[in-house]
Amino acid sequence: MQPEFKIKPFKALSLSELYQVLQLRSEVFVVEQNCVYQDIDGKDEKALHVLGMSGGVLVAYARLFKPGDYFRQASIGRVIVHPAYRDKKWGHTLMITAIKAIAEHFGETHITISAQLYLKCFYESHGFVQTSDTYLEDDIPHIEMQRN
């Protein structure tokens, strides 16, 4: 069964939802990827939050920004699928939902992302193309990608 997706501004997140978001981001981006960095970066309040819920568990998440809030174009970041649910391929459903939400909420089709290099093919499957050389972000190889 596919997760149920909700799209909410920061102030509409319940305390439980916010806790699950921060817990999942910490579990994957800090612990699993062994990367000490400041996940709570002051940008969550500007973002729309895409929450994929299944059985009361946050299984997929991304945050969306309108043009100018992160990149010059609209953007998607903190794309994540809970480790226990990765075999279900819900990352694709998450990206489809995020791209659609940017069009619906911001009226935008041009999207920029900062992608971890190892996920290049995944993002290419959603219409993104590499637009930069490889760079390090928090000691992890990244590339900028755009979708027009």
Image (spheres, helix red, strand yellow):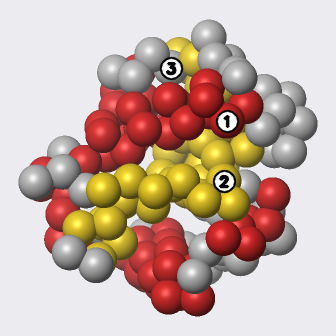
Image coordinates for residue 69, horizontal then vertical, percent: 86, 45
Q: Eyeballing the image, is 73 above or below 3?
A: above
66 displayed left or right of 96: right
First of labels 1, 3 by sequence position:
1
Nearest to the eye among marks 2 and 1: give it: 1
Q: Which residue is mark 1?
A: 105
Image coordinates for residue 129, horizontal then vertical, percent: 53, 16
Q: Amino acid at mark 1?
A: His
Q: Amino acid at mark 3?
A: Phe
Q: Which residue is mark 3?
A: 128
Q: Which residue is mark 2?
A: 48
Would residue 26 be visible to someone looking at this image? no
Nearest to the eye among marks 1 and 3: give it: 1
Q: Name the quarter where the N terminus is drawn.
A: bottom left
121 displayed left or right of 22: left
Q: Amino acid at mark 2?
A: Leu
Q: Eyeballing the image, is 75 above or below 34?
A: above
Question: Callout 1: few (<14), some (14-19), or many (20+) C-alpha neighbours within 10 Å?
Answer: few
